[in-house]
Amino acid sequence: MHVISVKDIRKGFGDLQVLKGISFDVDKGEVLSIIGPSGSGKSTLLRCITQLERIDGGAVEICGDTLATTDDDGTVVYSDKATLRKIRLQVGLVFQNFNLFPHFSVMRNIMEAQVHVLGSPKEDARRVAVELLRKMGLEDKADAYPCQLSGGQQQRVSIARALALKPEVLCFDEPTSALDPELTGEILKVIKELAAEKMTMVVVTHEMAFARDISDRVIFMDDGIIAESGTPDEVFGHPKNERTKKFLARFE
Amino acid sequence: MSQLLLQLLEGTLTSLKIFFLTLLFSLPLGIVVAQGRMCRNKLVSGIVNVYIMIMRGTPLILQLIFVYFAPYYVFGASFNRFTAVIVAYVINYAAYFAEIYRGGIQSIPKGQYEASHVLGFTKLHTFTHIVAPQVVKRIIPAMGNEVITLVKDTALAQTIGVAELFRVAQNASAREFSTMPIFVAGLFYFIMNMVVSKTFDKIETKLAYYN
């Protein structure tokens, strides 16, 4: 059973076709990086998997549960609310702009969903949060508010917030793009540690060296399709597709 | 003099009753109106929009007269004067509050909703725990303005014969052939608004713990 199974998904905004039939699977413990130029549909793809966008065609399965599928007559059918909700908790998402709750302390940011969505007792939620903060190197920031933290620290809190729900897979939407270059490293280090713990992850990134380093598999997207995919060595070392070569040449 | 002050205080009590009762009902009603205004159903948002336009586009004094007298023509009976004042003020202020709420709600970044959605919060929880507290912080200055205006608007209640502070002062003024009572009333309004102003400053300071 795949953690994520995406089949031929399509998504458009008005006349603009952003995803033109994307298929891939992610297995347990695997780290998949999605690279490609801006506007190639990488973020939209993540947003379809995390239910922030509705697909126009194709099928998505998460941990064996159907998120959405397409009828023979082309109608997209989403699963019932309970299933969607269950799936939502299995897929974590870390945003480019963190999207922490500014009026909550760091601790409450991490506890809120545990208490109100999972129904964990407060003491348990606090214990989980403290543990995650320790892991993120932020144990002294529990009572701080997001505005008092650096961008890198905020992003680490948002990773902790997503991990607190114990998702089956964690998606990252350009997690370092809003950060100063000197802060990028601390986030990449955290993701690398998670990879070492065999956390299943899908990472949309512009950090090529990083993608090459941590990924089990890399997808190169261009203009709404998967132009090339393979191991990091195949995609970065020996790209076959002309567009991949051209794209990667800019990072040499 | 002490006789006058006693009368003015009695009028002030009526003004304060109008003030607090109006807030009590219009603050929550404004949330409903704001939701209606933002409703995706065009009919609902259209009707609410017309209501807001009328409330903001005509004088409060006229609305007051309408609320008090219109029921006589339709039903042959009306509210008592004080109730009519409260009804008129509540529907008027709810419209203004609704627009302030709407501005606040729409200024909350989309990312807050998306993060809430991904974390599995219900729509209600997202509104009550994530959006609303942030809206409150953003709308405090605008709300302060509106509430201060309400203090002064209570003076219009005399139009339909409710003896609030300003009416009492005017009566005393006529009786004593002196404008002094009116200026004393002015001082009363000023003091009430100083309290309102300080209260809003306090709330603002209390919410200053985050950006």
Image: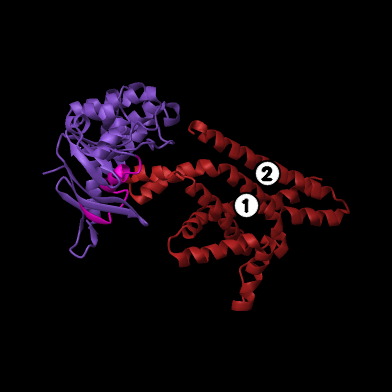
Chain colours: A purple, B red
Q: What subunit carries mark 1?
A: B
Residue drawn at point x = 36 percent, y = 35 percent: A109
Tell me if residue A145 comes above or below residue A48 in the rendering. Answer: above
Residue drawn at point x = 45 percent, y = 30 percent: A147
Q: Give the residue pinned by disc 2.
A: B192
How far across and how far down the image is residue B74, in percent? 60, 78
Discs 2, 1: same chain? yes
How far across and how far down the image is residue A65, in percent? 16, 50
Total number of numbered discs in the rendering: 2
Q: Nearer the viewer, residue B26 or B17?
A: B26
Lateral position of residue A199 relative to residue B61, left or right: left
How far across and how far down the image is residue A252, in percent? 30, 26
Tell me if residue A47 comes above or below residue A57 in the rendering. Answer: above
Do callouts 2 and 1 mark residues in contact (Cβ within 8 Å)? yes
Q: What stretch is highlighted in magenta?
A: A38-60
Q: Give the residue pinned by disc 1.
A: B19
Lateral position of residue B52 relative to residue A211, left or right: right
Residue drawn at point x = 63 percent, y = 37 percent: B198
The quadrant the N terminus of chain A occupies is top left
Residue type at mark 2 is Met
